[in-house]
Image (spheres, rainbow, N blue to C red):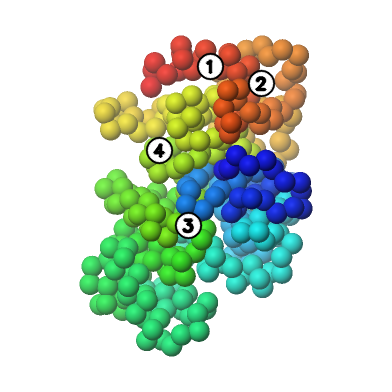
């Protein structure tokens, strides 16, 4: 996210990536599922944005939307209704020709999925798939592409890359497969890398190694990175900015340092409370936010978090419960925003007196 003033709709932004009022809705037999409902953010090159939220909050739908994947293959089974603007490097992708978006995908923007097996083909060797990903965008012979593939496998820490390139995905361990997928995503030096829960399926040690790797590669390539996770701990050290999603909307966003030091939204307080801490016993580790995520169909008016919010009864001047809280700047900050009806003073008091001492 940047500090530059927002240009008018339809006008290119100063930021490398800017998402404006993104809505992705799926018509279903039960009604319209509002998976993403008015999401906006900006990201510059060389910066990392952490998108955090629990299961079903719309994180993956957002990333697939940015990649333009809601119209193709397995993701296009139910035609999505998409609106808003997605600006990447001065180009608006929603109104762009699908062929142009296809060309950008893999070359200018790439994605790392939670489950590498779903992203890699089981019948082709890892090397062959990286070679193919490279040759789609580069007019080179197989030998040159193979050299590049082996170079990348080496770069992501796969031992004996020349030999391992000839293995099939199932012959790799989970962590190695995740590395191979990172190699595939990076083979064309993308300027935007989206990592959707890149470490969820991995054990803690391998998780840390993969996150270190993403950080190193980002510094090396200077790309813009979006890391998507349900665990604030994963992005605590990695992200420059944090965006907290709840029920398809952003409830809080800002510089990571501020979101961790002075979080403004009761849902973020809940996420912080459920963060695993190495200095605590296992039994004390997880205090999940009580209650279930909101329905994305027939979304009730008012604050979507209210059924789970311990502060839903705190009076807020002149605001009725049926009003939806909009993202508003946090006084005294330049980029920190939160969507909560409580006054800033009230939130600051609750955080300092009631929440922070317990974390
Ligand atoms: N093709 C689709 N048709 C209908 N609903 C969908 C479709 N794809 C996603 N959804 C719904 O959109 C919501 C958001 O899904 P999404 O996959 O983005 O969640 P998420 O935040 O990535 O969750 P997780 O942490 O479990 O990966 C969910 O309720 C999901 O069921
Ligand atoms: S608006 Fe009310 S219900 Fe929603 S998060 Fe703030 S205090 Fe809780
Ligand atoms: Mg997901």
Queried on whether the Cβ of the residue with tag 3 lies below 8 angstroms from ligand 3, the answer reads: no
Compare marks 4 and 2 and give the one earlier in the sequence: 4
Q: Reply above or below: 264 against 212.
A: above
Residue visible at 75% across and 25% down in the picture: 323
Q: Report whether 103 appears left or right of 260.
A: right
- As displayed, is residue 339 above or below residue 357? below
Q: Where is residue 129 in the image (x, y as percent from the top left)?
A: 42, 76
In front of the other: label 1 or label 3?
Answer: 3
Of 41 and 90, the residue lying toward us: 90
Whether label 2 touches label 3, CB < 8 Å: no
Residue denoted by label 4: 236
Q: Residue 228 at x, y = what percent?
A: 49, 47
Q: What element carries label 1?
A: helix
Mark 2 beta carbon near ligand 2 (under 8 Å): yes
As drawn, 349 above or below 233: above
At horizontal 61% and vertical 59% (from top left) the residue drawn is 89
Front label number (2 vs 3): 3
In the depicted view, which residue is nearer to us: 271 or 16? Answer: 16
Q: Which of marks 1 and 4 is nearer the N terminus?
A: 4
Q: How far apart are marks 1 and 3 (CA)?
A: 35 Å
Label whose residue precedes the other's in the sequence (4 or 3): 3
What label sits on residue 348 in the rendered view? 1
Image quarter for residue 40? top right
Query: Sequence-wise, which precedes: disc 1 or disc 3?
Result: 3
Image x and y of residue 242, in percent? 51, 39
The residue at which mark 2 appears reads as 341
Q: Distance between the residues labelled 4 and 3?
A: 19 Å
- Do callouts 1 and 4 mark residues in contact (Cβ within 8 Å)? no
């Amino acid at each position: 996210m940047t500090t530059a003033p927002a240009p008018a709709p339809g006008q290119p932004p100063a930021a490398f990536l800017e998402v404006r009022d993104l809505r992705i809705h799926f018509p279903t037999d039960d009604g319209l599922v509002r998976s993403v409902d008015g999401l906006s953010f900006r990201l510059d090159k060389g910066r990392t944005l952490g998108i955090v939220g629990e299961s079903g909050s719309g994180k993956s739908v957002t990333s697939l939307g940015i990649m333009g994947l809601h119209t193709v293959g397995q993701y296009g089974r139910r035609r999505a209704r998409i609106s808003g603007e997605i600006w990447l490097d001065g180009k608006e992708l929603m109104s762009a020709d699908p062929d142009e978006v296809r060309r950008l995908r893999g070359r200018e923007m790439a994605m790392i999925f939670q489950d590498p097996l779903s992203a890699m083909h089981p019948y082709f060797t890892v090397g062959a798939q990286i070679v193919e990903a490279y040759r789609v965008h580069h007019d080179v012979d197989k030998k040159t592409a193979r050299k590049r593939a082996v170079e990348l496998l080496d770069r992501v820490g796969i031992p004996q890359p020349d030999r391992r390139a000839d293995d099939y995905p199932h012959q790799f361990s989970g962590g190695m497969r995740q590395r191979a997928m990172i190699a595939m995503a990076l083979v064309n030096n993308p300027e935007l890398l989206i990592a959707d829960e890149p470490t969820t399926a991995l054990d803690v040690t391998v998780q840390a190694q993969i996150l270190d790797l993403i950080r190193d590669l980002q510094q090396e390539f200077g790309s813009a990175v979006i890391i998507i996770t349900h665990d604030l701990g994963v992005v605590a050290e990695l992200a420059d900015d944090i965006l907290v999603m709840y029920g398809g909307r952003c409830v809080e966003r800002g510089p990571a340092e501020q979101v961790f030091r002075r979080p403004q939204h009761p849902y973020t307080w809940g996420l912080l409370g459920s963060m695993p801490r190495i200095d605590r016993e296992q039994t004390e580790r997880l205090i999940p936010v009580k209650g279930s995520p909101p329905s994305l169909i027939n979304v009730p008016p008012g604050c979507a978090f209210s059924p789970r919010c311990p502060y839903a009864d705190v009076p807020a001047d002149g605001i009725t419960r049926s009003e939806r809280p909009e993202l508003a700047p946090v006084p005294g900050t330049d980029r920190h925003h939160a969507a909560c009806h409580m006054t800033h003073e009230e939130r600051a008091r609750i955080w300092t007196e009631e929440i922070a001492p317990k974390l």
